[in-house]
Image (tube, rainbow, N blue to C red):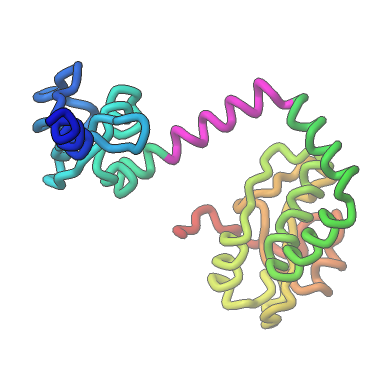
Amino acid sequence: MADQDHTTSAESPLPHRFPRKDLTGQRFGRLLVLGFAEYRGLYTKAAYWHVICDCGTAHIVAAGSLLKGDTKSCGCLRGGKDKDQSKKTRQLKQAAYYILHSDQLKAYSMQYYASHKEHCKARTRVYKKNHPEISITSRRSRRARISQAPINNFTHAQWVAMQETFNHRCAYCGRRAKGHLTQDHITPLSKGGSHTLSNIVPACRSCNSKKGTNEALNPVQPLLLIEL
């Protein structure tokens, strides 16, 4: 009889237990807790709850994720305006972290480069080969930064749009030179000019060379706004 009772007790499932803290009716971000779902886990039994998101999606979430703030929606926060806002928040946090730890990050980067110099150079060569336009834009921006240009915000997308607006023609002589135009600063960088949309026009290599650091060869109208 004793053996029979022992066998029955060993084979019986764990008794149903209700979580110590009732989350029913509580709200966590966009999630409203509807009721207890189940325990999960092999060794540590974690309580899971039925929730419904403001977007109408039902879900089952661990109590710990709700209480710690790790889960605030069914995933819809990653879409639309909330995604943009979340991205901006992450960018601000990253910028703040870099400002506070700039010395440590620079030291780590220098140490890593010293230890993996060949790997870093090979990776850079591959990236420049696959993204030549970004590499060119970076060099031009660096040149403007060295020249201490007051404004340095001209992008590759603006350069592409500018060439299309000018129909791939030189702003000075009007000759069409698709794929061979250069960026000419109306006010040269050496004379305090900015590396920005309103101070740049497309020019063929000949006209750019003739102009040099002098005034424009003939009056030109720079683009003040390009909608991208």
Q: Is residue 4 left or right of residue 141?
A: left
Q: Position of residue 217 (x, y in %)?
A: 77, 64
**Could you tell me which residue is drawn at 70 percent across and 48 percent down?**
195
Residue in front for this viewpoint, 117 or 38: 38
Splitting the image into 4 quarters, where does residue 28 fall? top left
Q: Position of residue 200 (x, y in %)?
A: 67, 57
Q: Would residue 118 be seen by someone viewing this image from the given angle?
A: yes
Q: Is residue 159 left or right of residue 68?
A: right
**Could you tell me which residue is drawn at 74 percent across and 50 percent down?**
141
Splitting the image into 4 quarters, where does residue 207 fall? bottom right
**Could you tell me which residue is drawn at 55 percent across and 66 percent down?**
161
Q: Please tell me whether the stretch drawn in magenta is mainly helix, strand or loop.
A: helix
Residue in front for this viewpoint, 214 or 180: 180
**Could you tell me which residue is drawn at 71 percent across and 58 percent down?**
137
Is 12 drawn above or below residue 175 in the view shown?
A: above
Splitting the image into 4 quarters, where does residue 50 fall? top left
Query: Residue 115: within the magenta?
Result: no
Is 163 drawn above or below residue 1 in the view shown?
A: below
Q: Which quarter of the rendering shows the N terminus?
A: top left
Extreme-front residue of the structure: 1
Residue in front for this viewpoint, 114 or 228: 114
Q: Is residue 3 left or right of residue 132?
A: left
Q: Magenta stretch: give its range.
A: 87-102
Q: Position of residue 129 (x, y in %)?
A: 75, 70
Is 13 drawn above or below residue 155 in the view shown?
A: above
Query: Residue 96: within the magenta?
Result: yes
Q: Would residue 14 be seen by someone viewing this image from the given angle?
A: no
